[in-house]
Every structure is written in C-alpha cells, then in structure tokens.
Image (spheres, helix red, strand yellow):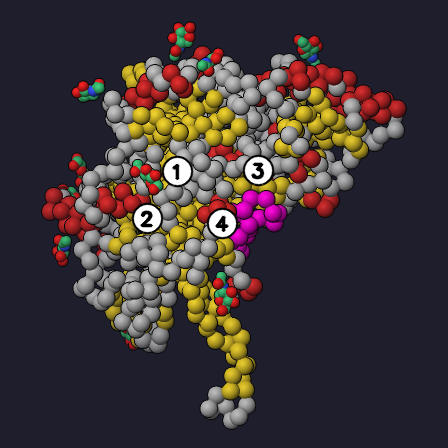
Amino acid sequence: MVHPTRLVCTLLAASLAIPASASPKAPWVKGPGKRPVTRREAAINQSRRDQPWNETDSCGTGVSNYTVKAPKKNIWLGLTEAEVAGITEFVHNQKSLNLTAVENATNWDNSLLLVELMLPNKTDALNYFDGGGAEPARHAHIEVDHRASVHNPAYLDYIVGPLPISNKTTVEPLAWPYTKGPGSSHNYAADDDARNDFMNNFGAELADITRALWNGTAMGLDNDTMSIWGIDPLFQEDGRTISWDTFWNNNNDVYDDSTLLPLGLFLKPDITGRDPSQWSNQGVLYNGEFYDTIDDFKSAFYSGNIQTFGPNEDEEWGRTDQRGPVNPTDWQSPPMLIQPAGQRFQVDVEQQYVQWMDFEFYIAFTRDTGIKLFDINFKGQRIIYEIGLQEALAHYGANDPVQSGTAYLDSYYGFGPYAFELVNGYDCPSYAFYLNSTFYADETTRTHLNNICLFEQDAGHPIQRHSSSQYVTITRNIFFTVRTVSTVGNYDYMLDYTFYMDGSLHVTVRASGYIQSAYFANNEEYGFHIHEYLSGSMHDHVLNFKVDLDILGEKNSLQNVSFVPATVEYPWSNGKTRNTMKLEKSFVTTETGIDYPYNSAALFAVVNKDKPNKYGELPGFRVLPSTAPVHLTVNAAHWAERNFWVTKQKDTEPRSSHPFNNQDVADLVVNFSKFVDDESIEQEDLVLWINAGMHHVPHTGDLPNTVFSTAWGSRINYHNGNVTEVATFGSETIQPECTVDLRDSFTDLWDYTGDVVVRKFPYDPNDPFFNTQSIVKRDEDL
Ligand SMILES: *[C@@H]1O[C@H](CO)[C@@H](O)[C@H](O)[C@H]1NC(C)=O
Ligand SMILES: *[C@@H]1O[C@H](CO)[C@@H](O)[C@H](O)[C@H]1NC(C)=O
Ligand SMILES: *[C@@H]1O[C@H](CO)[C@@H](O)[C@H](O)[C@H]1NC(C)=O
Ligand SMILES: *[C@@H]1O[C@H](CO)[C@@H](O)[C@H](O)[C@H]1NC(C)=O
Ligand SMILES: *[C@@H]1O[C@H](CO)[C@@H](O)[C@H](O)[C@H]1NC(C)=O
Ligand SMILES: *[C@@H]1O[C@H](CO)[C@@H](O)[C@H](O)[C@H]1NC(C)=O
Ligand SMILES: *[C@@H]1O[C@H](CO)[C@@H](O)[C@H](O)[C@H]1NC(C)=O
Ligand SMILES: *[C@@H]1O[C@H](CO)[C@@H](O)[C@H](O)[C@H]1NC(C)=O
Ligand SMILES: *[C@@H]1O[C@H](CO)[C@@H](O)[C@H](O)[C@H]1NC(C)=O
Ligand SMILES: *[C@@H]1O[C@H](CO)[C@@H](O)[C@H](O)[C@H]1NC(C)=O
Ligand SMILES: *[C@@H]1O[C@H](CO)[C@@H](O)[C@H](O)[C@H]1NC(C)=O
Ligand SMILES: *[C@@H]1O[C@H](CO)[C@@H](O)[C@H](O)[C@H]1NC(C)=O
Ligand SMILES: [Cu+2]
C-alpha cells in the first residue's frame, strides 16, 4: 500500500553564501610568492613527474590521470562493513537490550534501528589533524527501537565503543550530545500497523459515503482506491495522543501523485496508549462542519442538507510525462556541457577526499542528514571545520486540521536513505565523477551507487572583466560542485556545495517533486485554487545548516558592519549639514539569533581580531543569503525563527536537532534554544547555524511537479580595431587540439542500477543483492 510515511512539498532555490571578506586576497596570502605550498600542488608536481603532460593530446588527459592520497585518514567516513557486522552481533548479545532480529521482530519486540559512526569530537579531530595526536578512538552510535514495553515504547540512543569490538567494548546510554540527557524519546510510531487497521475500520464504516462521493473505498482491501493518513507530528493534548487524518485518492498508475489527491473528509482519532481497543474517533469534519460522531455525520449526509464536492483524481494533470505537442526544434540534441581536457580535480575515493584548485576537503555521509563536508582548506589553510545540513522543516498553515497540523522534520525520515543514484547527464553533467555511499537499514548495509556527484562547470558568465581603450581583461568563472539529491517522500531536495575560485562557498537547496496539497473548500486565505477541488497549501520551508568556520585558527569573532544614515556637518560643508551614510562597526558579543536587518543594511563576517592584515583590517568570511532570507512565520521550532544563529562551539552541541524531535515536540531530545545561553563569543571558536528556506504558496506551475527553478584568465589588447596582443597565461591548452567525441557524452539510461544491500545480521557479505526502496522505514513493517 501507499504508506504515508513522508510527505512534504517543495522549495525553490534557496541558498546561503560565504564569500571571502572585502579584502581582495585570502588573508594569509601576504603577496606573490608567499603562498603556502599546498598538499595539492606537491601532488600535482609528483603526478607530472610520473605522467608527463602530453602536449599534443589535451583532450581527455590533462592532470586527470593522477590519483591523490588524503594527507590524513578521513575520520568522519563511517563504519566499515566488518565494524557494522561486529557491532550488530555485539549488541544482540547484550541481554539488557533484549533485541530481536529485525526479520523476526513484531511491534512488541525491541530491534536495532541504526548503527553508525559516532562522529569524533572536534577537540580530538584537531589533535589528530593539527597536533600530531593519535587518530581519535572509534565509537559507534546505535539507536534501539524499544517496543517491548506497554507504557513506554521508546527510541533510545546508545554509544558502543571502543572499536573494534573487544572485551573493553561497552554499550552505554548516550547523553552528552543531547540537551535532554540520555537520548530517548517516546515512540509514537510503535503501533503504526494497528493504526492503519484502526483507520481502515472507519473507512469501512464510511464506505457507503465514500462510494457515493468518490466511487471508492479505504478499508484495507486490495482493491481500495483511497488511503487515510494525516498529521505529523501527532498532537499531545491534555495527556491524550490525538491525530487528525483525511482521505486521499490513491494514484492508479506509476505516477506518485497521491499528495495531489485530498478528498476533504477528516477524522479525529484519539490513539492514546498501546491498546487499540481503547482508541476512539473524536469527530468528523466535512466542508467546515464538525460532527461529534460518524453517526452524526452520516445522518447529516443522508438528510441531504449538506453541500458535497467532487474528488481530486489521478489523471493526466498529475503526471509528469510529456503532454501536448512537442516543440518543433525539440527533437534536436540540446546544448550540453563537455570537459575537453579531462577531469581537473582529484579524489581519493577510499578516503572520500577531494582537491579542486585551492580547495581541499573530506566528505562524510550520514543517515539523518546525508552529506557533510569536513576540514575544508583554502590555499592550505583550514577555513571550515564542518558544514552540513542539520534539519529540514516544512510547516503548513491551513483551516483544515491535517494541513494545519503538518510540520515535517525530515531528519526523522532521513536524507541518507533517500539519496538515490543520480541520473547521469541530467542530475549532473555527463562527465561528472561519482561516489557511492553506504548506510545502515534493518540489519543490512545498503549502498547507493553513484549518489554523490562532483563536477566542474562554467557559470555562463565571467568572474571578472574590464574593457578600456587599450585592452579587455576577462576571467572565466569556473566553479566546482558536490551534489546529492534526496527524495524524502513526495519531495526531492537537491543539495549543492559549490566552490568558487574567489574562495567563496555557496550552499544551495533546490526542490522538486510533488507538493502536498489541501482540499479546496473555503480556504482561499491559505493557498491558491490550483485544480478543480485543490488548494496549493501554503507552507514555510526552513533548512538549518551548521557552519563551523575557523579563520586563522579557532578563536574568532562575529563582526557587524552596518550601513546607517547620517546627517553630518563637515569642515568643508560651509556650516551646512549633508545627508549621507556611515559604517557602524561592532562585534556581536554574546550567543544570539540574528535576522538580516531591514533593507539588508548590515554585513556579518566571522573574523579573527588577533590576526589583522597590514592595514589593520580583519580577515574573515562574510555570511550572506543569495536569495531573500527566510525564517519560519509561526512560533514553533525555535531554531527556525531567525535567519541565523551564532554560538560558541562545544563538543556537547554537535547538532542542532535530533531525528526523534518530531515524536514529542514538547520534550525535545535536542532543544536548540538551550545552545543560545548568553555566553561570550568574542575570540571564541564560533559555530553559525544558518537557515535557508522559502515561503511557498504552490500555484498551477507547481503541477504536476514543482520546478527547480582554474580560472582560465586571458587578456586581449587591441588598438583601432586590430588585436595587438593575446595573452592566455599559460592556458594555451584550452585551444582544443582534438575533436571531442560526443558519443562519450551520451548517457545510457539503461545503466541505472539502484541500491546494493548486504545483510549484517547474520553477516552475509558474499551475497549482496539489489533492492531500492523509496521508503526505508524506521520500523519493521517493510
Ligand atoms: C612544483 O613545480 C613548480 C614548477 O616546476 C615549482 O615552481 C614548484 O616549486 C613546485 N612545487 C613543489 C611543492 O614542489
Ligand atoms: C601523446 O598523444 C598523442 C595523441 O593521442 C599520441 O599519439 C602520443 O603517443 C602521445 N605521446 C605520449 C608520450 O604519450
Ligand atoms: C592513466 O593511468 C592509467 C593507470 O596508470 C593508464 O593505464 C592510462 O593509460 C593512463 N591514461 C592516460 C590517458 O594517460
Ligand atoms: C528468525 O526466526 C527464525 C525462526 O525462529 C529463525 O530460524 C531465524 O534464525 C531468525 N532470524 C534471525 C536473523 O535471527
Ligand atoms: C524482551 O522482549 C520480549 C519481546 O521480544 C518480551 O516479551 C520480554 O518481556 C522482554 N524481556 C524483558 C526482560 O524486558
Ligand atoms: C566528546 O566530548 C564529550 C563532551 O566533552 C565527552 O563527554 C565525550 O566523552 C567525548 N567523546 C570521546 C569519544 O572522547
Ligand atoms: C581481553 O582480551 C584480551 C585480548 O584478546 C585477552 O588477553 C584478555 O584475557 C581478555 N580479558 C578478559 C577479562 O577476558
Ligand atoms: C466506479 O469504480 C468502478 C471500479 O473501480 C468502475 O468500474 C466504475 O466505472 C466507476 N464508476 C464511475 C461512475 O466512475
Ligand atoms: C473489492 O473487493 C471486495 C472483497 O474482495 C469485493 O467484495 C468488492 O466487490 C470489490 N470491489 C470492487 C469495486 O471491485
Ligand atoms: C561504486 O560501487 C560500484 C559497485 O560496487 C563499484 O564498481 C564502483 O567502483 C564504486 N565507485 C567508487 C567511486 O568507488
Ligand atoms: C549591528 O549594528 C547595528 C548598528 O550599530 C545595530 O543597530 C544592530 O543591532 C547590530 N546587530 C546585531 C545583531 O548586533
Ligand atoms: C589592422 O591590421 C591590418 C593587418 O596587419 C592592416 O592591414 C590594417 O591597416 C590595420 N588596421 C588599422 C586600423 O591599423
Ligand atoms: Cu513547498
């Protein structure tokens, strides 16, 4: 059946950018020739010795053919297959956990939900990277779905270590990264199967009406044409657990459009406790009228006194195949990106370590939030210790209880399990380099093939140019992207980390896929009318990113440079005042949340006060939004209520959210507000928690899917219409000396593979199989 595990809608391009500060050069570059020798430069020289540059064959070779070795081990990479198998066996042997193998577990057994690397503390990581210390001891983070409990089914976090498993290894409740204490949250999903059956009973009770209104049923039968599901998170009201659920038409073809098919009839189940015989329905809502019981609704319906409306149905309008006439030129091959000199960046595949131009960094991949980058160096200096997604919120507003009660926190569903194989030539250019990534699910490890792509691209406009009467100078704007796409339910997030030659880094989230819509009945204040009985339900998207910048060391400050209007009398202004503006420069002194001010008239930069440049100005990176900044409209999730936050780095505050924060929003495992407690942030190790997002009111253009909406420098001198000199600064090889074989850019869509799965309990490494699931559930009812 179509299980409503995860449903949200879409977000257009929203990004934050961290370009270099006003000083034109990176601060540690004191002048030509003083540039530090980077690991990358040494490696390129080595490669040129090993593999002489072939001047006559620039296409497809270049420096692409050397491999780089990460200078240090990637300590964020994740557990090995053997470690996962060892840990799984070890925790199954712990009597106190009372685990049942996933394949045999029922809703009343404990099972192992997650096994992943416990990311090392920054203190230990820096000691390894910078202090010549030992590699940090390895530990695992596990999550147990504790369901063998009548009153307290819970999700529990433990730490297992040290690794590898030995007689020193222990398993302990994990507390220090969480504001709540030991990681634990009531599990309100423990009885989801029983809930489905319970709702289907109401579907059966209402079958006469669902047939009359929509010619179908939601009764748990194979020939059902509808489903019943609703809010997330559940309401906790006066000690009761309340849901609101509504009827949706199912899609009747492959197209995944059921979130476009609400039917406008709502039920209010009380599902308190684990005994379904104690559950009840508290009311029915139809066309804005609330009925206490199903019988009340039925009598109103049969009295003929209520106005009824038709269904939203799975038809052409909800499907993404080509419709209408093809444009007459569209049969021709479109423009495409090519890479004539081969790949110019280097990847240590084993360590997931990347070098491109002046940047070097490590990649990590987690179940909850997908890709993260660590130890980002620019010109041989660390600029960012860690950058990564923390949480994604989609908060809806509506006059109906289901949309009104929807505020998805997507790290519960996870970005890792849904980061599927990318479509070469479509998601990424056909020459992109791909990495695989592996995550744990249900006592297997699953490998998404080719789900991270890396590529260079031309921005389509130069990064610099100038014309004079004597010359024109111009520099290509080549940038480098690391990309993943996570399809969380109905909804596809494309996440890019993009590096520019000027030292700036952009984070961009785009979204496509199906919106989650509302039934159109008296709700003009909450959306646009986008199909016969459909409202594009208004909602806010807010995605939180952790950015741990280190500018010339860890001790940094947050500078505030504001534009302020001023009326000034100058010695030269003849006794009169002039209306002008000034800069007010200050520092943000304590941990706080910051909104970009009215008219965006302030620049915020993380700087190092102790390392001024020769003009006394402070080197650093500015933080700015590259689309209109957005935060949550509603007071609901503290972290989402400001454009960004600044706090002091602490090993005890590694992440601003927790996957089980969606279970009980009144009792959060990680409550971000507790991070912001007035501590001084002057010349401290700072972390920015930056929100990107959008206010989304879907319109007809969101149907069927929301749409994603080496500097080769040269100079040409000219005189009176004649070119007098061309200088390309050693980049002559950009003149292609070969023909590009476009057959290499052809994408064979038949190559798409899907996920590789390896069973961990019992461990069976020699029998991997292919299995891609669009919903990898936290619970066992796969
Ligand atoms: C790499 O080679 C260039 C050109 O031969 C040289 O100038 C530079 O010093 C070398 N760098 C290193 C780290 O060996
Ligand atoms: C350089 O490339 C040309 C053209 O592909 C090839 O004929 C030649 O053998 C290559 N030379 C070396 C030294 O590899
Ligand atoms: C690249 O390196 C591999 C392995 O060292 C070698 O077999 C191959 O011929 C090289 N390709 C080019 C274009 O030089
Ligand atoms: C599941 O239960 C069956 C029957 O009791 C047993 O044979 C099997 O080993 C169990 N699976 C695991 C992984 O423990
Ligand atoms: C262990 O779990 C089983 C269900 O798998 C349950 O019946 C039993 O009571 C649990 N034992 C303890 C000590 O909690
Ligand atoms: C990481 O830091 C926390 C907080 O200081 C500490 O409790 C924990 O033991 C550290 N973890 C390791 C593996 O050292
Ligand atoms: C722990 O393991 C070590 C090495 O395998 C072994 O020498 C030692 O006897 C073990 N200790 C205990 C208490 O089992
Ligand atoms: C009602 O549904 C049935 C079975 O799905 C179908 O055969 C029939 O044509 C439908 N009737 C109408 C009026 O759409
Ligand atoms: C659906 O299946 C049920 C039970 O098998 C059957 O009674 C009913 O007639 C079917 N409905 C339709 C529309 O085919
Ligand atoms: C990804 O996995 C496939 C299948 O195991 C393997 O052939 C390929 O080399 C892997 N890619 C990388 C970059 O490791
Ligand atoms: C930044 O400075 C301006 C002007 O001095 C001031 O009004 C504003 O409150 C400051 N903002 C923050 C977040 O400190
Ligand atoms: C441009 O150069 C051409 C070829 O050298 C020469 O014939 C012509 O006179 C030049 N034009 C000008 C305006 O100098
Ligand atoms: Cu949206």
Q: Is residue 260 above or below residue 470?
A: above
Give SS at disc 1.
Answer: loop
Rendered residue at 52%/23% (across/down): 153
Mark 2 or mark 1: which comes first in sequence? 1
Ligand 6 closer than 8 Å to label 1 CB: yes
Identify the element where label 4 is drawn. Answer: strand
- Give the image location of residue 260, x and y in percent: 64, 33
What's under tag 1, amino acid-wise? Answer: Trp
Q: Which mark is residue 385?
A: 2
Circle 4 sits on which residue? 691
Which residue appears at 21% of the width and 66% of the height?
32
Relative image position of residue 571 (x, y in whole percent): 46, 91
Callout 4, which amino acid? Asn
The magenta-colored residue range is: 628-644
The residues tagged by marks 3 and 2 sit, at their Cα atoms, a distance apart of 32 Å
Q: Is disc 1 in contact with disc 3, using a CB cutoff of under 8 Å?
A: no
**As drawn, is 507 to the left or to the right of 267?**
left
Q: Gap in Å between the C-alphas at discs 1 and 3?
A: 20 Å
**Between tags 3 and 4, which lies in front?**
3
Q: CA distance from mark 3 to mark 4?
A: 22 Å
The disc placed on residue 212 is: none
On screen, 147 above or below 487? above
Residue linked to disc 1: 176
Check if residue 641 falls in the magenta segment. yes
Quadrant location of residue 188? top right
Instruction: Work out how far the residue at label 2 is from the one at label 1, CA to CA, in angstroms.
Output: 20 Å
**Of residues 30 and 133, which is closer to you in this image?**
133
| Magenta stretch prevailing secondary structure | loop
